[in-house]
Amino acid sequence: MRDNRQAGRFELEIDGAIVFANYRRAQDRVLITHVEAPVHLRGTGAAARLMQEIASDAREQGVKITPLCSYAAAWFRRNRGYADVTA
């Protein structure tokens, strides 16, 4: 995963395509505003892989995530093991 700060998004390259999560930072939080995978990667778990990497990275850095995007919010509901990084 790559934090493309200039574009305000986390990116994960899979099979030559980019899965991304747009974000903005607010104090000690990262607000996830949109998650998107290219059409041919939808349903393959690509966006879930990106979210797991984002959540793991947030845990390591001591940062909290506020999932504003419906996909990100649903991912955190399904993955309660990362509840400690949500705010």
Image (cartoon, helix red, strand yellow):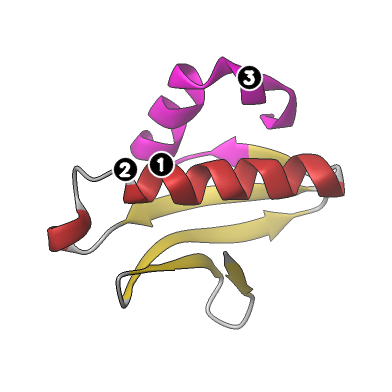
**Residue 48: mark in rendering:** 1
Q: Are marks 3 and 2 in contact (CB under 8 Å)?
A: no
Q: Are marks 1 and 2 in contact (CB under 8 Å)?
A: yes
Which segment is the magenta one? 66-87
In the displayed structure, would residue 37 be above or below residue 75? below
In the displayed structure, would residue 67 be above or below residue 79? below
Return the residue at label 3.
81
Is 85 inside the magenta-drawn segment?
Answer: yes
In the displayed structure, would residue 49 be above or below residue 75? below
Q: Position of residue 52 (x, y in %)?
A: 54, 41
Quarter containing the C terminus: top right
Q: Residues within 10 Å of mark 1 (few under 14, many from 20)?
A: some
Q: Residue at x 46, y 65 (%)?
A: 12
Q: Residue at x 28, y 58 (%)?
A: 37
Q: Amino acid at mark 2?
A: Gly
| Left or right of residue 36, residue 30 in this image | right
**Furthest-bottom residue in view?**
6
Q: Secondary structure at mark 1?
A: helix
**Residue 73: mark in rendering:** none
Q: Position of residue 32 (x, y in %)?
A: 52, 49
Q: Are marks 3 and 1 in contact (CB under 8 Å)?
A: no
How far apart in space, not on screen, are marks 3 and 2 (Cα)?
18 Å
Return the residue at label 2.
45
**Furthest-right residue in view?**
62
Q: Secondary structure at mark 3?
A: helix
Front-most of 49 and 8? Answer: 49
Magenta stretch secondary structure, dominant:
helix
Mark 3 or mark 1: name the one nearer the start of the chain. 1
Q: Residue at x 21, y 57 (%)?
A: 41
Mark 3 or mark 2: name the one nearer the start of the chain. 2
